[in-house]
Amino acid sequence: MSSSLRLAKISPQNVDAACHLRVHPDQERFVDPVVTSLAEAYAYGEVAWPRVICDGEQLVGFVMAGFDPTHEVEPYRSYLWRLNIAADRQRQGYGSFAVAAVCAEARRRGQSRLWVSWQPGVRGPEPFYTRLGFRRTGEVVDGEIVAKREL
Ligand SMILES: CC(C)(COP(=O)(O)OP(=O)(O)OC[C@H]1O[C@@H](n2cnc3c(N)ncnc32)[C@H](O)[C@@H]1OP(=O)(O)O)[C@@H](O)C(=O)NCCC(=O)NCCS
Protein backbone atom coordinates (compact mmCIF):
# COMPACT_ATOMS: atom_id res chain seq x y z
CA MET A 1 0.00 0.00 0.00
CA SER A 2 1.15 3.53 -0.77
CA SER A 3 2.99 5.42 1.98
CA SER A 4 1.22 8.64 0.91
CA LEU A 5 -2.11 7.34 2.18
CA ARG A 6 -3.83 9.62 4.67
CA LEU A 7 -7.16 10.89 5.94
CA ALA A 8 -7.94 14.58 5.58
CA LYS A 9 -10.60 16.89 6.95
CA ILE A 10 -13.21 18.21 4.56
CA SER A 11 -11.92 21.46 3.11
CA PRO A 12 -12.75 23.99 0.38
CA GLN A 13 -10.08 22.25 -1.70
CA ASN A 14 -11.53 18.71 -1.53
CA VAL A 15 -15.29 19.08 -0.93
CA ASP A 16 -16.18 19.10 -4.64
CA ALA A 17 -14.19 15.93 -5.39
CA ALA A 18 -15.72 14.30 -2.29
CA CYS A 19 -19.24 15.05 -3.55
CA HIS A 20 -18.42 13.55 -6.95
CA LEU A 21 -17.12 10.28 -5.51
CA ARG A 22 -19.13 7.28 -6.78
CA VAL A 23 -19.25 3.62 -5.80
CA HIS A 24 -20.32 0.96 -8.34
CA PRO A 25 -23.96 1.51 -9.43
CA ASP A 26 -24.96 -1.87 -7.97
CA GLN A 27 -23.42 -0.86 -4.62
CA GLU A 28 -25.42 2.37 -4.31
CA ARG A 29 -28.17 0.66 -2.35
CA PHE A 30 -25.65 -0.17 0.39
CA VAL A 31 -24.41 3.34 1.17
CA ASP A 32 -25.71 6.90 1.04
CA PRO A 33 -23.87 9.35 -1.22
CA VAL A 34 -21.21 11.61 0.27
CA VAL A 35 -23.46 14.69 -0.09
CA THR A 36 -25.94 13.09 2.32
CA SER A 37 -23.17 12.26 4.77
CA LEU A 38 -21.85 15.82 4.68
CA ALA A 39 -25.33 17.19 5.32
CA GLU A 40 -25.64 14.83 8.29
CA ALA A 41 -22.19 15.79 9.52
CA TYR A 42 -23.31 19.42 9.49
CA ALA A 43 -26.49 18.56 11.40
CA TYR A 44 -24.78 16.32 13.98
CA GLY A 45 -21.92 18.72 14.72
CA GLU A 46 -19.32 17.34 17.12
CA VAL A 47 -20.70 13.78 16.95
CA ALA A 48 -19.73 13.34 13.29
CA TRP A 49 -16.14 12.63 12.25
CA PRO A 50 -16.06 12.91 8.42
CA ARG A 51 -12.80 12.45 6.49
CA VAL A 52 -11.71 12.00 2.90
CA ILE A 53 -9.25 9.23 2.10
CA CYS A 54 -6.35 10.46 -0.02
CA ASP A 55 -3.59 8.65 -1.83
CA GLY A 56 -1.14 11.40 -2.67
CA GLU A 57 -3.20 14.07 -4.39
CA GLN A 58 -5.94 11.62 -5.37
CA LEU A 59 -9.15 11.43 -3.37
CA VAL A 60 -10.04 7.72 -3.31
CA GLY A 61 -12.77 7.50 -0.68
CA PHE A 62 -14.79 8.93 2.15
CA VAL A 63 -15.29 7.69 5.69
CA MET A 64 -17.39 9.02 8.53
CA ALA A 65 -17.47 7.85 12.12
CA GLY A 66 -19.81 8.90 14.90
CA PHE A 67 -18.67 9.44 18.48
CA ASP A 68 -21.27 10.25 21.11
CA PRO A 69 -19.63 8.92 24.30
CA THR A 70 -22.51 9.56 26.68
CA HIS A 71 -25.26 8.18 24.44
CA GLU A 72 -27.56 5.80 26.34
CA VAL A 73 -27.51 3.29 23.45
CA GLU A 74 -24.02 1.79 23.40
CA PRO A 75 -23.54 1.41 19.60
CA TYR A 76 -24.02 5.14 19.15
CA ARG A 77 -21.02 5.90 21.35
CA SER A 78 -18.50 4.73 18.78
CA TYR A 79 -19.55 3.69 15.29
CA LEU A 80 -18.50 3.54 11.68
CA TRP A 81 -21.23 5.54 10.03
CA ARG A 82 -20.29 5.67 6.32
CA LEU A 83 -17.61 4.26 4.08
CA ASN A 84 -17.44 4.85 0.32
CA ILE A 85 -14.47 3.80 -1.79
CA ALA A 86 -14.49 5.02 -5.41
CA ALA A 87 -15.57 2.29 -7.83
CA ASP A 88 -12.24 2.21 -9.67
CA ARG A 89 -10.21 2.26 -6.44
CA GLN A 90 -11.70 -0.73 -4.66
CA ARG A 91 -9.78 -3.86 -3.59
CA GLN A 92 -6.57 -1.88 -3.11
CA GLY A 93 -6.66 -1.70 0.68
CA TYR A 94 -8.18 1.78 1.02
CA GLY A 95 -11.26 0.60 2.90
CA SER A 96 -9.10 -1.39 5.35
CA PHE A 97 -6.88 1.64 5.87
CA ALA A 98 -9.91 3.83 6.64
CA VAL A 99 -11.34 1.34 9.14
CA ALA A 100 -7.95 1.07 10.87
CA ALA A 101 -7.81 4.87 11.10
CA VAL A 102 -11.31 5.03 12.61
CA CYS A 103 -10.34 2.32 15.12
CA ALA A 104 -7.30 4.38 16.10
CA GLU A 105 -9.45 7.49 16.54
CA ALA A 106 -11.96 5.55 18.65
CA ARG A 107 -9.14 4.24 20.88
CA ARG A 108 -7.71 7.75 21.18
CA ARG A 109 -11.12 8.82 22.49
CA GLY A 110 -11.09 6.03 25.08
CA GLN A 111 -13.52 3.71 23.31
CA SER A 112 -13.00 -0.05 23.42
CA ARG A 113 -15.45 -1.05 20.67
CA LEU A 114 -16.44 0.06 17.20
CA TRP A 115 -19.90 -0.69 15.85
CA VAL A 116 -21.15 -0.88 12.30
CA SER A 117 -24.28 -2.02 10.48
CA TRP A 118 -24.89 -3.01 6.89
CA GLN A 119 -27.60 -4.07 4.49
CA PRO A 120 -27.29 -7.75 3.56
CA GLY A 121 -27.11 -8.59 -0.16
CA VAL A 122 -25.00 -9.46 -3.18
CA ARG A 123 -22.07 -6.98 -3.58
CA GLY A 124 -22.71 -5.77 -0.05
CA PRO A 125 -19.89 -5.06 2.43
CA GLU A 126 -20.37 -8.10 4.69
CA PRO A 127 -17.23 -10.03 3.53
CA PHE A 128 -15.19 -6.86 3.98
CA TYR A 129 -16.32 -6.22 7.56
CA THR A 130 -16.07 -9.90 8.51
CA ARG A 131 -12.52 -10.00 7.19
CA LEU A 132 -11.68 -6.95 9.34
CA GLY A 133 -12.87 -8.64 12.53
CA PHE A 134 -16.40 -7.31 12.96
CA ARG A 135 -18.70 -9.90 14.50
CA ARG A 136 -22.48 -9.90 14.30
CA THR A 137 -24.29 -9.13 17.55
CA GLY A 138 -27.46 -10.92 16.41
CA GLU A 139 -29.42 -7.68 16.19
CA VAL A 140 -31.00 -6.36 13.01
CA VAL A 141 -32.03 -2.69 13.09
CA ASP A 142 -34.05 -1.18 10.22
CA GLY A 143 -33.09 -4.20 8.10
CA GLU A 144 -29.38 -3.74 8.79
CA ILE A 145 -27.14 -6.38 10.38
CA VAL A 146 -25.42 -4.98 13.48
CA ALA A 147 -21.80 -5.93 14.20
CA LYS A 148 -19.00 -4.81 16.47
CA ARG A 149 -15.25 -5.07 16.73
CA GLU A 150 -13.33 -5.08 19.98
CA LEU A 151 -10.48 -2.58 19.88
C1 LIG B 1 -16.94 -2.30 1.12
C2 LIG B 1 -15.86 -1.33 0.65
C3 LIG B 1 -15.82 -0.12 1.57
C4 LIG B 1 -14.50 -2.08 0.71
O1 LIG B 1 -13.46 -1.16 0.39
P1 LIG B 1 -12.10 -1.66 -0.35
O2 LIG B 1 -11.15 -0.53 -0.36
O3 LIG B 1 -12.47 -2.23 -1.67
O4 LIG B 1 -11.64 -2.83 0.63
P2 LIG B 1 -10.15 -3.44 0.79
O5 LIG B 1 -9.39 -3.34 -0.49
O6 LIG B 1 -9.53 -2.85 2.00
O7 LIG B 1 -10.54 -4.99 1.06
C5 LIG B 1 -10.05 -5.74 2.17
C6 LIG B 1 -10.61 -7.14 2.08
O8 LIG B 1 -12.02 -7.12 2.28
C7 LIG B 1 -12.61 -8.15 1.45
N1 LIG B 1 -13.47 -7.54 0.44
C8 LIG B 1 -13.50 -6.24 0.08
N2 LIG B 1 -14.44 -6.05 -0.87
C9 LIG B 1 -14.99 -7.24 -1.11
C10 LIG B 1 -16.02 -7.70 -1.99
N3 LIG B 1 -16.67 -6.88 -2.79
N4 LIG B 1 -16.32 -9.01 -1.99
C11 LIG B 1 -15.67 -9.87 -1.18
N5 LIG B 1 -14.69 -9.50 -0.31
C12 LIG B 1 -14.38 -8.21 -0.27
C13 LIG B 1 -11.46 -8.89 0.79
O9 LIG B 1 -11.09 -9.95 1.65
C14 LIG B 1 -10.41 -7.82 0.74
O10 LIG B 1 -9.10 -8.34 0.69
P3 LIG B 1 -8.47 -8.81 -0.76
O11 LIG B 1 -8.77 -7.72 -1.75
O12 LIG B 1 -7.01 -8.99 -0.45
O13 LIG B 1 -9.17 -10.10 -1.09
C15 LIG B 1 -16.07 -0.88 -0.83
O14 LIG B 1 -16.29 -2.03 -1.61
C16 LIG B 1 -17.25 0.08 -1.01
O15 LIG B 1 -17.09 1.30 -0.97
N6 LIG B 1 -18.44 -0.53 -1.26
C17 LIG B 1 -19.65 0.27 -1.54
C18 LIG B 1 -20.16 1.03 -0.33
C19 LIG B 1 -20.40 0.15 0.89
O16 LIG B 1 -20.95 -0.94 0.85
N7 LIG B 1 -19.98 0.70 2.04
C20 LIG B 1 -20.20 0.13 3.33
C21 LIG B 1 -21.53 0.58 3.85
S1 LIG B 1 -21.84 -0.03 5.49
Image (spheres, rainbow, N blue to C red):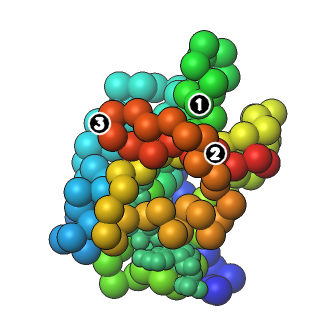
Of 83 and 137, nearer the camera is 137
| Residue for badge 2 | 148
Q: Is mark 2 within 8 Å of ligand 1?
A: no
**Could you tell me residue 12's position as x and y percent?**
36, 52
- Say what secondary structure mark 2 lies in: strand
**Picture coordinates of residue 104, whole percent (x, y):** 74, 52
| Number of marks in the rendered image | 3
Residue 134 in the image: above or below residue 132:
above
Ligand 1 neighbours mark 3 (CB distance < 8 Å): no
Q: Position of residue 89 (x, y in %)?
A: 41, 82
Q: CA distance from mark 2 to mark 1?
A: 8 Å
For the point 63% across and 86% down, the residue is 2
**Disc 2 to disc 1: CB gap under 8 Å:** yes
- In which quarter of the view is residue 24 placed? bottom left
Which residue position is annotated with label 1? 75
Does 76 appear above or below 18?
above
- Amino acid bearing label 2: Lys
Residue appearing at x 45%, y 45% in the figure: 145
Q: Which mark is residue 39?
A: 3
In which quadrant of the rendered image does the N terminus lie?
Answer: bottom right
Q: Is residue 4 left or right of residue 110?
A: left
The answer to whether residue 35 is left or right of residue 89 is left
Of the image marks 2 and 3, the number of the one nearer the N terminus = 3
* Image side of residue 51 versus residue 25, left or right: right
Q: Residues within 10 Å of mark 3 (few under 14, many from 20)?
A: few
